[in-house]
Amino acid sequence: MYLQSLQEVFGPEATFREGQDKAIEQLLNKKRVLVVQKTGWGKSLVYFLTTNILRSQGEGVTLIISPLLALTRNQIDSTRKYDLVADCINNQINKTLTEKVEVIERCNRGECDVLFITPEQLQNDSFIDLISQLRVGLFVVDEAHCISDWGHDFRPDYRRIHQLLQILPENIPVLATTATANDRVIKDVTKQLGDCEVIRGDLQRESLHLHKLYLPTAEEKYAWIAKNINRLQGSGIIYATTIRECERLAMWLRQNAVDARAYYGRLNEDDKIELENRLQNNQIKVLVSTIALGMGYDKENISFVIHYYTPKSVVEHYQQIGRAGRGIDQAVCVLLYGGEDENRINEHFIYHSFPKQEQIDQVLSYLSQNDEVKMLTLEQVMNIKSTTLKQILKLLLIEGFIGKSGASYFRTLKPYTSQRKYYNSVINIKVQEYNELLEFQRTADCQMAYLTKALDDPNTRPCMKCSTCLGEAWDFTDDSLSHDDMKQVLAFFAKNYITIEPRRKSMLTNKKLTFIHEEGLALSYYHEQLGQQARRGKYELNLFTDLFVRTSAYKLRRFFSDKGYNISEVIIIPIPSNRRPELVPRFAQRLANTLKCNYANILAKRPNEPEQKSLLNTSLQEQSIREHLYIKDQINLDNHHILLVDDFVDSKWTFTVAAELLGEMYDDIKVTPFALADTSGSD
Amino acid sequence: MQFTNNEIATYLFCAQLTQTRTKALTILEWNAIVKSLSQQKLEPEVLLTINSTELLNVLTHATEVQKSKISEKIQARQKLGFSMIELKDIINQGFGIMFRSNMPPRLKKLTTKYTPAFFYYAGEPSILSHRSLGVVGARAATEQELTQTFDIGSEAASYGIVIISGGAKGVDTTGVEATLQNGGKAIVFPADGLMKWVKKSNIRSYITNGQLLLMSAQRLDAPFSGAYAMQRNKFIHAPSDAVLVASSKISGKKKSGTWEGVLENIKHQWSPLYVIGCSEGVEKLKAQGNAELFSSFDKVFTRNERSEPKKRTESNEIDERIISLIKLAIAKGLDRETIEEKFVDFSTRYYEKQKQIEQDNTQNLVVHEQLSMEEYMRGKVD
């Protein structure tokens, strides 16, 4: 009977793929259905055709929770084919509440049949109020593997869907779909759905050509990417871990005349949309992205995905390579792996996925003893890193142990039971899944077969397309790296600036600072070789060797001339320390001699300052610096350019406060900070 | 806490859910639905799927006006399932929902006419099963009235008597705080939503200690409402074993909440009234013989247990009849062993049969969860 509906849309020859009609039938009977099928199987056919039938019966709209950032042209086209009108609510398209209200009203007036929303909307109380007004005929959860508690990534937004499924009345049918789930995840998702039908097919993607390559250093990876990027046709994505890495890699590619741009969560929404659109229209060759460009991105013709880092699980890897080769017959996916850093960083993330119990207890006990507490107060009374504090609050909120009204938090009545056991079991599973991926790096089997087998696909078979299956015949990439290839990378690394962006607001008062320093410079990253030498210089030798004076002087000269400043007119002022009173001033003095510029040791610190790195959040750090740092000698520095010199930079509060002190004291000055190593994010 | 489909339907149609911009069923409309459904052996969950024609046919116990209103309201909310995330959040934060089927006998004194489809609560609901003294009175009571209220509240703690109040300033708060500070228990029906209350650290600790139960028929974040303040007077007077009126004006042009509650109690004969002090209302109650002076807990609460001696006479009567049966058996020539055996045998068989009947009944009760209140009240109301 649904065949007729199908043929009305697709013509008299159309037939269902196996499982599609069954799914539709169950949904029309108000049942719950889980569809596990690879990209391209036709999951959207199931929900659009069901919507079509439900709407003709006078039912409400179909609500689709999907991480898709915007409706793609493809989707709008397909809804039109079904004679449906689609709309969406997410933070990019309709930011204001009024805009969202309009969408909901359109739906309830019958002017819209399908509403797409992004999962993070569900965290927002005013959106929950809005969606409470929506007459819903069918509820669809896309990328449903995320609702598993044991999913590859802890996504609080999806936790909310889990709660919703527990209470949603049975008169609203639910369809959950995913292309990536192993047995364990399927079991967990079906448990959450309750009584449901599972429709599952094989996962092998015919268009993907997989390749993996052991390249243990950053330099080798950079060289390989520069060499191969133009061999790969079309445009694509490179996945990297950190924002800095994305930016540096994109810069390297641009230097090699490749149109590359960095993409990450912290970019503003307009920039993100622009980058997505440009990739969409093949106007750029490659986006170098963190996982922020994730499930939500559904470009039809991505021709390659390169992993600059190893993903944390097979599920994550399959997800990310799954972006490639959707609307095209052929795409190349390369995993570049190896290096000491890589395992260390991945394991760090896995073992630190959840906050420490002592810190959770600390937050709970403070909230228990108080009525309502502002976020700002929490930061000030608690020595907890602010990202960790936010994570703790989010976890406690979702579990219902605390509540939130406006910017204040309060303890609820729910008795606290430690979630440690659950956290540990999640960590154990993550370790196991990571090991599965490390195994993938080593495997001599077909790469696609390895992945689908790990995803418990019963129809696993050799793909005859990956570099393992093809062996010598693999020619999508050239993996040999010459001495010359490497030399260029080394030169690039030597010239590359690690900048120090100024802070603009005080965390204590939330007001703009009275004086803001210029963009500054760090000589190295702490975890890199030079950074580690700086660590030994500070903690073991109590001396920074001539190497540091030379390389610093070299970089600073270039940095200043790039900015159009004359370095010899600069006055160097060292950041004082009561713990190591001579270390930084001596280095700064030598640096001043080399650069032939002036030197003035005029800053000092009051005694008994706690070590900056023992203060875990930015409020406490700012407060401590403000209490201890002062100008001890009054000399006239009006109209001068000051170079502040310190050993390490992390929270930037020392530079920020020092610059502000100087700016308040002297007229028309410029302040540029310089540190030997950037330790931020290195814990 | 997992909910049955009946409970989900009850909440969806009876909760305020102001965010949905639709109207909830009133108590009377809900009663009409429950009565109609029960007659046709249907349960509230059918409301989730029933269409309007079917619904109008089902509603045999509703007036014509009610029928159209009910139908409108059910249609408006039937597909608003997403609004139920509210219920999930409420439970997730440690609040409870008490549907009619879970309400203890004490609350059933209210009769269905006044009983909301559910209460929100925070705390240990078993506090409702203790003997209790309602405490009502003006916000602006005199120093002396407050001192006396405080003493009574403190003393209640040592008698194991629970204080029930409306949580307003003045008398209500004084009585409750006195008993809580002395380790006693209290039930408060505030005139505003419960959320504001549990944000307070000291309130939370009384609740966690099992001393305090907060109950409300209003949504959790409801602001103070005069109308609800009046409605909730019933929740204090009806379940209490006795009510202390510590201070009251008499309603004139401006209605006095305390006084209106007292009048309702007198009309429905919910619980005996006791007074202290010499406020306007208190004097009138005494003069008309509607209330006695509060003298002591011993007096107030033995008075309420008049039923005890009756039981004793009943049991004397049974003893005598058993003795006469034994005499009869001896006269018929039965020996002691046979008489004892027969006794055990008969009582065992009797209780087994009783148990069977009870089991059947409970099953019925489970099936008709939402309707049990209706059955319970059948013949007693209207």
Image (tube, coloured by chain):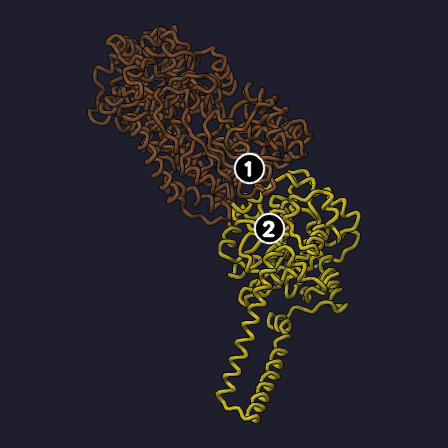
Q: Amino acid at mark 1?
A: Val
| Chain name for mark 1 | A
Check disc 2 and report its element: helix, strand or loop: strand
Label 1–label 2 contact, CB within 8 A: no
| Front tag of 1 and 2 | 1
Q: Residue furthest left?
A: A541
In terms of depth relative to the viewer, which is nearer, B196 or B108? B108
Q: Which chain did the renderer colour yellow?
A: B
Percent from the top left, x then y, of residue B82? 59, 38
- Quadrant in which the C terminus of chain A appears: top left
Q: Amino acid at mark 2?
A: Tyr
Q: Which residue is mark 1?
A: A174
Percent from the top left, x then y, of residue B278? 71, 64
- Quadrant in which the N terminus of chain A appears: top right
Residue A515: tell me if it is visible: yes
Please tell me the colour of chain A: brown
Residue A287: tell me if it is visible: no
Q: Categorize mark 2 by other alpha carbons within 10 Å: few (<14), some (14-19), many (20+).
A: many
Q: Which residue is mark 2?
A: B120
In terms of depth relative to the viewer, which is nearer, A573 or A372? A372
**Disc sitting over residue B178 in the figure:** none
In terms of depth relative to the viewer, which is nearer, B330 or A20? A20
Tell me what residue is drawn at x 46 percent, y 33 percent.
Answer: A36
Tell me what residue is drawn at x 64 percent, y 73 percent.
Answer: B303
Tell me what residue is drawn at x 68 percent, y 65 percent.
Answer: B271
Vertically, is A252 above or below A434?
A: above
Vertically, is B107 above or below B354?
A: above
Percent from the top left, x then y, of residue A510? 49, 28
Side (left or right) of A14 relative to A565? right
Percent from the top left, x then y, of residue A617? 40, 32
Check disc 1 and report its element: helix, strand or loop: strand
Residue A451 position by quadrant:
top left
